[in-house]
Image (spheres, rainbow, N blue to C red):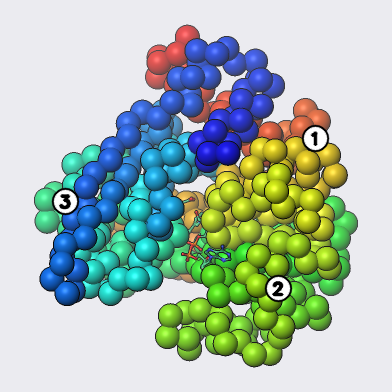
Amino acid sequence: MRAFESTQIFFDAAAEHLNIEPSLREALLMPSREVQVQVTIERDDGSLANYVGFRVQHDNSRGPMKGGLRYHPQVDLDEVRSLASLMTWKTAVVNLPYGGAKGGIGVNPSKMSKREIERLTRAFVDQIHDIVGPDTDIPAPDMGTDHQVMAWFRNQWEKYHGFNPAVITGKPVEEYGARGREEATGRGVGSLTVKLAKRLGIKPAAAKTAIQGFGNVGTHAAKFLYESEFPIIAVSDLTGTYYDPNGLNISEVLRHKLNHPKGLLEGYQHCECLPVDALMSLQDVNVLIPAALGGVITSENVNDIHASIIIEAANGPVDPEADAVLQEKGVTILPDILANAGGVTVSYFEWVQNRQHYRWTLDRVRQELDHTMNEAFENVWQTAQQNNVSLRNAAYMIGITRVRRAAELAGLTS
Ligand SMILES: NC(=O)C1=CN([C@@H]2O[C@H](COP(=O)(O)OP(=O)(O)OC[C@H]3O[C@@H](n4cnc5c(N)ncnc54)[C@H](O)[C@@H]3O)[C@@H](O)[C@H]2O)C=CC1
Ligand SMILES: O=C(O)CCC(=O)C(=O)O
């Protein structure tokens, strides 16, 4: 199933509950603008390389559009469209004054030098600089991009429009970035995992956890949960699944990654090394946290999953067919638009600080992040209970209701 079709099915299930008529559903779902650009750079060897870049601006009813930039070979218009619409519902679920957007380039950054990635980023900004800005559309990091890419992006954008660090978030801390943005998505994932387990009566020691993907989100979620005494029995990246039924020493695993020239888990010796896909079907896992790509749990592998809780740290990891099977089995799924909203929440704090020319302490960022995530969790939980629907359905109902209300107040819908 294509990514946008998946998102549409989840949207429709909630819109049905809300009795939204078809033409309004279409208006809420259809992206406002989709831009596709050619991104051509000179490689280090002097040859030319051409890529396709995208920015999809989904909805701005609640404020400037917001969403990350992904550099990955699978990036295409359908995927970016799906991710942009998720941002609209996500920013609404955590009640930020933003709409939703997303961008990306179909490219494999691990096969490029640092200088090539810089040229790629600058060439992309040359193509899209006039459609992004602090009051229109504010990018941020996602898979394959980081604070360095954000710094290049800002620098190139400012060549056209002048000083304004609020054009992008997730910047280096010493260059107008927010303290705590880097850890924010993983911290939010970790804190809601602890909260959900507690709500379901599962003690930390019994919450054996597996995390797919050990990048920005996976590492910070692992760190938070390890410190909360959850046994992390498996983590994976592109090089394999690293498994210890008694719990991995996450401090040691993080040290290994830090010392690996490419930041990989490859070569980690103090546990069993299994094939990449083995993580999904481990029998002793209670909490499964997909924190890499979307579309990783489908009708093909759903019956191999043994976890009773799935925390969607990645965007769109479970497709609607698999979701239905898991609901039937009584698996609790914390949906992406709530679970991974910590990143965009601290992006919002960064944008606010940039606009005020002021800096918050890390303590303040964490405190406000925890407050925002807690409030959103309680709201989604209560809505699910009151309407006897899944947490995903409840989160979409909240997001759609807020966007619809903003569109109504603006006079765009009757
Ligand atoms: N970075 C952020 O603040 C946010 C990220 N997300 C979502 O979280 C997910 C991960 O994003 P980041 O951590 O930023 O990306 P990243 O690029 O920092 O890390 C991705 C990790 O996934 C691994 N990976 C890729 N394919 C894999 C596979 N098939 N099996 C196992 N591991 C695999 C990579 O080796 C790497 O360790 C994405 O879905 C992203 O959209 C969501 C909200 C915010
Ligand atoms: O931090 C942001 O603005 C967006 C992060 C993002 O792309 C996401 O939540 O999927």
Separation (CA) of disc 1 from disc 3:
48 Å
Q: Residue at x 84, y 53 (%)?
A: 200
Callout 3: helix, strand or loop?
Answer: helix
Look at the numbered disc 1 and say if its residue's Cβ is closer than 8 Å to ligand 2: no
The earlier-in-sequence mark between 1 and 3 is 3
Location of mark 2 (residue): 234
Amino acid type, mark 3: Asp
Q: How many marks?
A: 3
Spot occupied by residue 36 in the image (x, y as percentages of width and height): 28, 40
**Picture coordinates of residue 109, whole percent (x, y):** 35, 66
- Tell me the kind of residue under disc 2: Ala
Q: Nearer the viewer, mark 1 or mark 3?
A: 3
* Residue 84 visible (yes or no): no
Above or below: residue 44 compared with residue 21: below
The image shows residue 408 at horizontal and vertical percentages of: 46, 17
The CA distance from mark 3 to mark 2 is 42 Å
Name the residue nearer the viewer: 367 or 251.
251
Q: Write the residue at 24% across / 44% down.
A: 37
Q: Would you name the residue on which mark 3 appears?
A: 126
Q: Position of residue 226 (x, y in %)?
A: 69, 75
The crowd level at tag 3 (other Cα within 10 Å; few <14, some 14-19, many 20+) is: some
Crowding near the residue tagged with mark 2, few <14, some 14–19, many ≥20 C-alpha atoms within 10 Å: many
Of the two numbered discs 3 and 2 on the same chain, state the one appearing first in sequence. Answer: 3
Secondary-structure class at tag 2: strand
- Say what amino acid the circle numbered 1 marks: Gln
- Residue for badge 1: 385
Q: CA distance from mark 2 to mark 1?
A: 32 Å
